[in-house]
Image (cartoon, rainbow, N blue to C red):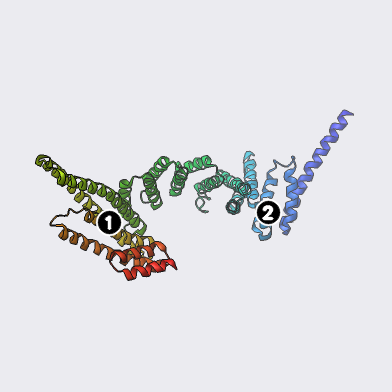
Amino acid sequence: MKKLVLIVLACVAGIGAQAQKFNIESALIELQRGNIVDAKNYIDEAAKNESTSNYVKMWYVKGEVYLAMAADETLSKQYPDCGVTALQSFMNCIKIDKEGRRRSYDEADEKMLQAVAPAYNYGINIFQEGSAVIENGDQTGGKAKISQAVDAWNVVLNAYDFDPNRQMETTMNLPKINILQLMADAAIKSGDNDRAFKLFNEVIASDNPVPYAYTRSALLHMELGDTAQALKVIEEGKVKFPDEKDLTTLQLMVYQSQGKEDLLTDKITEALALDPENPTLLANRANLYDNRARAAFDNLKKELEEAYKLSSAVRKEPNMTKKKALQAKVDSANQRVNTILAKIQHLDSLAIADYTKSYEIAPDQFDVVFNLGAVYFNGTLPLVEIANNLPGDANYEKNYAKLKTEWTKLFEEALVWFLKAEELEPDNDSVLQSIQQTYAQLGNQEKSMEYRDKRKQ
């Protein structure tokens, strides 16, 4: 009786295997007839059964069916990941086929390559959907979709091992590093920064790294507040890609965030040697010169205060020896004032030159136009400050008149650029206020009041 049971079980197993092989053949027939959905139903049944799960023909036919689905506009929308299934099926077919004595399905190699594009594109589409869902506030739903994209790209990554002739990289123009970078971007979207860095490092360590791996990795370090590590990645990238503008821009951003303005100025100058007509670089360097001039003005005011105190002390000191010593200190302070003033004026001239060139290249830059006016306006402040601290001696009138002539010219230049800025942004209150103040400094009260009224409208 026991033997009879075993025989019956063996017969049932044999019938089951035959049934699944029948499903495979039926799927193939329906596919040839163009009945893709019926073919899918048959092959899915065969794929689920243990008796045919390791059957090379089953995987080949499943790949064929799902590749046909990917090529059908209606079915590819209904089953958007069909390309991924097709790709994985052909890879399974090739793997099992190669384990035999000789290949039975050489054509699976070419079919596999045909499945790469729909699998890759599915990953792109679902990643974009996930990103949009995250942007709309649904972190959980968005991350789930992005995870599906990563799963698809992992299947594509595995396909490189089944492509000995590197057709994916050459004929299809899909380098492996492209997939790694997409997966790194997906990791960033999902908040997995450690994985993103790991993937970018894989690209960087590859035989053919690309600038994006350096720039995006560095930017991520900056977003996380690690400017030192960002700079390290940037400098490594510039060794590989010395002319890459995005790396240069990030390098400048790091130096600026670290407060290394002198070094930043030097780096911009180096970048301009390679790209002399870049209006953004010119404006950035002008801004640095401007900032340094304004910082120097703070030092000028301190020296003027010191000189004023010393001059008062000289007038009050009855002892001639002490008076002479104090006067020497006054002379020294005045010399420092003149040195700082010369520095400010030199920096202003450099800023004006860069801003002007940037404007000539791209005249519609509001910030450049307005900042030009501001440089001229701020250039008057040291002169006014010096005038306010002039000694009331016989040379006072002459010295004051000379300074006034200089600052009047600067106010006139400032007005030219502020009016140009008004043309670009007529309702900008900062512009209107600057014009109002400049007219007031030039003694044109009527125009100053006109712009005061404009600001109230």
Q: Residue sitting at 19 percent across and 45 percent down?
A: 310
Residue 324: x and y in percent read: 11, 43
Q: Is residue 51 above or below residue 26?
A: above
Distance CA(mark 2)–CA(mark 1): 71 Å
Location of residue 182 in the rendering, given as x and y in whole percent from the top left corner = 53, 48
Residue type pointed to by label 2: Tyr
Q: Residues within 10 Å of mark 2 (few under 14, many from 20)?
A: few
Please tell me whether mark 2 sits on a helix, a strand or a loop: loop
Residue 92 lies in what quarter of the image? Answer: top right
Q: The N terminus is located in which quarter?
A: top right
Q: Which of 289/4 is in front?
A: 289
Which numbered circle lies on residue 381? 1
Q: Is residue 276 above or below residue 48?
A: below
Frontmost of labels 2 and 1 is 1
Q: Nearer the viewer, residue 318 or 79?
A: 318
Q: Residues within 10 Å of mark 1 (few under 14, many from 20)?
A: some
Q: State the image coordinates of residue 412 (x, y, percent, origin top left).
A: 27, 66
Residue found 36% across the figure and 51% down from its top: 243
- SS class of the residue under badge 1? helix
Image-based side of 340 in relation to 252, left or right: left
Q: Would residue 412 appear left or right of 165 to someone viewing this image?
A: left
Residue identified by numbered label 2: 79
Q: Residue at x 30, y 60 (%)?
A: 377
Q: Amino acid at mark 1?
A: Leu
View extreme (top): residue: 2
